[in-house]
Amino acid sequence: MSAGQVIRTLVSPDINTNGIVTVARYLYCTDHNADKHFMLDLDGTKIKNWGVYALGPGAIAFDGMRLISTDNMSNALYKIDLAGTIIRTVASGATFICGLAWDGKYFYYTDAGVNQINTIDQNGVLIRTVNIGTTFSTGLAYDGKYFWVLDGPAEQVFMIDRDGVTLKSFGITASGAPRLMFAIDFDGYNLRITDAGNPELITVARN
């Protein structure tokens, strides 16, 4: 199976899913239209949802214990337990976070319209910034070694090392229009992408 080829498609929990992360046997999504978090099983069935405190819930990641959700209006990071309770709020210093990932020590985010990956610690302090070769980064995932950056408007995925070097890139072969791709997640094997244009959760091959 070639990189970018669609493996599976699920219906999104709402019409504007901006963030997605796999946690064990579940998917957690943020939706800007509904202003909610959704918990789904791996077949896309809604298990529960809860309202959010953010004005514009966006990217989401998991740090091994808690969900980390961003607010696209304030660019704060909310640390949340799996029941939806806020544990802590951290300022990021970003302009508009579109992608968020965790590597076991640091958070990484992409800023809309700024083609960089920024590294911050758990207190939101900027550690490092690397330039990347995308046009408009809308999503970010980490597979334990490499970053996967989604350029939503271009419908392209970039495999990038820690120094910002693009190792490969490929288009997404999903059908249907209009497509509006926001977020990307590594599920342990493949990549899952949110498409608010249809709206769908699309699993694509990465190799």
Image: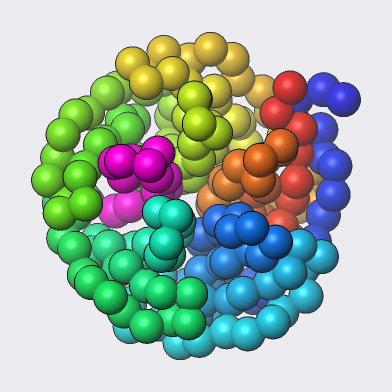
Report whether 42 appears left or right of 122.
right
Residue range corresponding to the magenta coloring: 95-111
Q: How is the image coloured?
A: rainbow
Across and down, in percent, residue 170 comes to 66, 23
The chief SS type of the magenta part is strand
| Residue found 25% across the figure and 36% down from its top | 119
Answer whether residue 98 is magenta in the image: yes
Look at the image and tell me whether residue 106 can be seen: yes
Across and down, in percent, residue 49 comes to 57, 84
Across and down, in percent, residue 112 comes to 35, 45
Residue 3's image quarter?
A: top right
| Residue found 82% across the figure and 40% down from its top | 6
- Front residue of 136/132: it is 132
Report whether 144 appears left or right of 86.
right
Vertical order, 78 against 172 (above or below): below
| Residue found 54% across the figure and 50% down from its top | 183
Answer whether residue 170 is magenta in the image: no
Q: Where is the C terminus found, in terms of image quarters?
A: top right
| Residue found 64% across the figure and 58% down from its top | 24
- Front residue of 101/74: it is 101
Q: Where is the N terminus found, in terms of image quarters?
A: top right
Across and down, in percent, residue 175 comes to 83, 45
Look at the image and tell me whether residue 12 can be seen: no
Vertical order, 56 against 34 (above or below): above
Residue 107's image quarter?
A: top left
Residue placed furthest toward the front: 65
- Front residue of 139/143: it is 143
Q: Count of labels shown? A: 0
Vertical order, 62 against 171 (above or below): below
Residue 152's image quarter?
A: top right
